[in-house]
Image: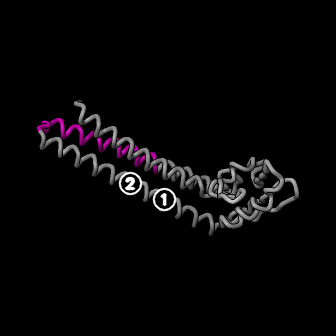
């Protein structure tokens, strides 16, 4: 494979990795009724006038499947942490015991589980749109190389390679969603 085709495949790989990473990150934020420190990843806390991620001012852990404990490094941050969790609007109710913030994660109703599965499938579609966009860019680059003298056989082989990569990442996105759906529907 010549250098130009290698560059096309490298750019394709970068694009599909971004799409997959985005889907995995977004699906990871969807809560499945089990407590997880990642549920608080989007929480920003006011730390002496600037907004910082919760993880920079406190230790977050899960002692059991229904509880998240947030232990600040400075006791004065307890109220700010509680406020940040409320402002994040993630459906969790923090309780401050003077030492740490305790969050009891409520069990999900069947209806809510179905809504979350729909949200996960919507995210998978966003990821697949990203894959299609990456494929289109790669195919356009191959066609441009063909106009500049790349043989038709090499162009066809490169397009087949592009499709293999896209098919692989489509399957990986589907597997991610299937795993999340299984996790959500398991009580």
Q: Which mark is residue 130?
A: 2
Q: Identify the residue position indicated by label 1 in the image.
A: 123
Image quarter where the N terminus lies is: top left
Q: Is residue 170 visible?
A: yes
Pointer 2 with pointer 1, Cβ within 8 A: no
Q: Is residue 140 left or right of residue 128?
A: left
Give the structural element (helix, strand or loop) at label 2: helix
123 magenta-colored: no
Question: Quick check: 15 above or below 82?
Answer: above
Discs 2/1, front: 2
Q: Is residue 25 left or right of residue 57?
A: left
Check disc 1: other Cα within 10 Å, few if <14, some if 14-19, many if 20+. Answer: many
- Number of marks in the rendered image: 2
Q: Which residues are magenta?
A: 149-173
158 in magenta: yes
The local crowd at label 2, few if under 14, some if 14 to 19, many if 20 or more residues have their Cα within 10 Å, is many
Q: Nearer the viewer, residue 139 or 88?
A: 88
Question: In percent of the image, x 23 and y 45: which residue is there?
Answer: 141
Q: Quadrant of the C terminus?
A: bottom right
């Amino acid at each position: 494979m010549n250098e130009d085709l290698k560059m096309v495949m490298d750019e394709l790989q970068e694009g599909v990795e971004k799409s997959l990473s985005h889907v995995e990150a977004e699906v990871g934020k969807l809560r499945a009724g089990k407590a997880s420190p990642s549920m608080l990843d989007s929480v920003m806390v006011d730390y002496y006038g600037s907004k910082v991620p919760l993880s920079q001012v406190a230790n977050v852990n899960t002692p059991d499947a229904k509880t998240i404990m947030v232990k600040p490094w400075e006791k004065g941050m307890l109220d700010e942490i509680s406020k940040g969790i409320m402002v994040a609007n993630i459906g969790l109710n923090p309780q401050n015991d003077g030492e740490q913030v305790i969050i009891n994660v409520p069990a999900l109703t069947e209806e809510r589980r179905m809504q979350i599965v729909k949200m996960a499938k919507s995210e998978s579609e966003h990821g697949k749109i990203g894959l299609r966009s990456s494929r289109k860019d790669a195919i356009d680059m191959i066609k441009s190389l063909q106009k500049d003298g790349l043989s038709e056989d090499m162009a066809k082989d490169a397009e087949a390679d592009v499709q293999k990569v896209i098919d692989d990442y489509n399957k990986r996105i589907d597997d991610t969603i299937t795993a999340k759906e299984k996790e959500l529907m398991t009580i």
